[in-house]
Image (cartoon, helix red, strand yellow):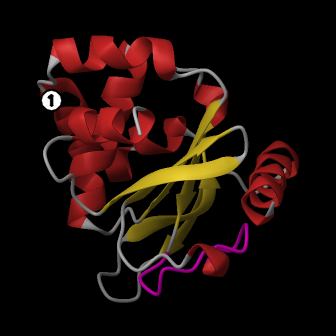
Amino acid sequence: MKNFLFIILLTASVIYSQNTNKLVIDERSGKPMLVGICDRAALLDSNFAWWYEPEYNNYEFNSATVDSIKDKLDDLNILIVLGSWCSDSRREVPRFLRILDELKFDPKKVTLNFVDRKKESPEGNISDLEIKFVPTFIFYKNGKEIGRIIETPTISLESDFKKILFK
C-alpha cells in the first residue's frame, strides 16, 4: 500500500509540478545538475546531451531478450532515481531508456527523479525507498514493487529487466 501511495504522489507531483527540469549548481563540480522530477527533454539540454546521446545511440541491446519482454509490460510503472552528476547514471539510464523506446513503452509510465549527491530530491519523499546507490530502477506492477536494478546490472539491463518481469 505504501508503494502504491508513493506512485500516486509521484504522478500527482509530475502533473502539478511547476519546477519540472529544475537545474541547480553542484557545489562539488560547479556544474549544473538536475534535481527533482524531470522529463526526458531535460536530458537533451546541452549540459547533459553530451553524455546522454552517445550512450543512448550506441547501446547495442540483445534484441531477442528485449522481444521476450514485450508481452509482460501491462500494468508496469517504472521509477528511475538517478543523479545527473553520477557516472553510473550517465551510462545506464540512456541505455535503459533506449530499451524502453524499443519496447514502445508508454513514457507516462516512467518517472525520472533526479537526486543530489546526498541522494535527496526536492520532490517526492524518496527516503522511504532507501536509495543508497544511483541509478536505481524500481519496477511496480499493479502498484506493488516487484524488483530493482541498482547501480549497474548483474548481466545486462535487458536481462535483469526480464528477470524481474518473469519472477
Left or right of 84 in this view: 7: right
The residue beneath circle 1 is 59
Q: What residue is rendered at 40% in x and 88% in y? A: 27
Quick check: is 19 in the magenta stretch?
no
Residue 8 picture location, percent across and down: 83, 50
- Secondary structure of the residue carrying tag 1 is loop
Q: Quadrant of residue 164?
A: top left
- Residue 104 visible from this viewpoint: no
Above or below: residue 2 compared with residue 159 = below
Asked whether 119 or 129 is in front, the reply is: 129
Q: Quadrant of residue 100?
A: top left
Which residue lies most toward the front here?
167
- Residue 127 visible from this viewpoint: yes
Residue 95 picture location, percent across and down: 26, 36
Above or below: residue 89 compared with residue 56 = below
Q: What residue is rendered at 23% in x and 44% in y? A: 50
Above or below: residue 129 compared with residue 153 = below
How many numbered marks have been drawn onto this rendered protein structure?
Answer: 1
Quick check: is 117 in the magenta stretch?
yes
Callout 1 amino acid: Tyr
Q: What residue is rendered at 28% in x and 63% in y? A: 151
Quadrant (top left, top right, bottom left, bottom right) of the C terminus: top left
Asked whether 1 or 136 is in front, the reply is: 1
Q: Main secondary structure of the magenta part?
A: loop
Extent of the magenta region: 116-126
Q: Residues within 10 Å of mark 1 (few under 14, many from 20)?
A: some
Quadrant (top left, top right, bottom left, bottom right) of the N terminus: bottom right
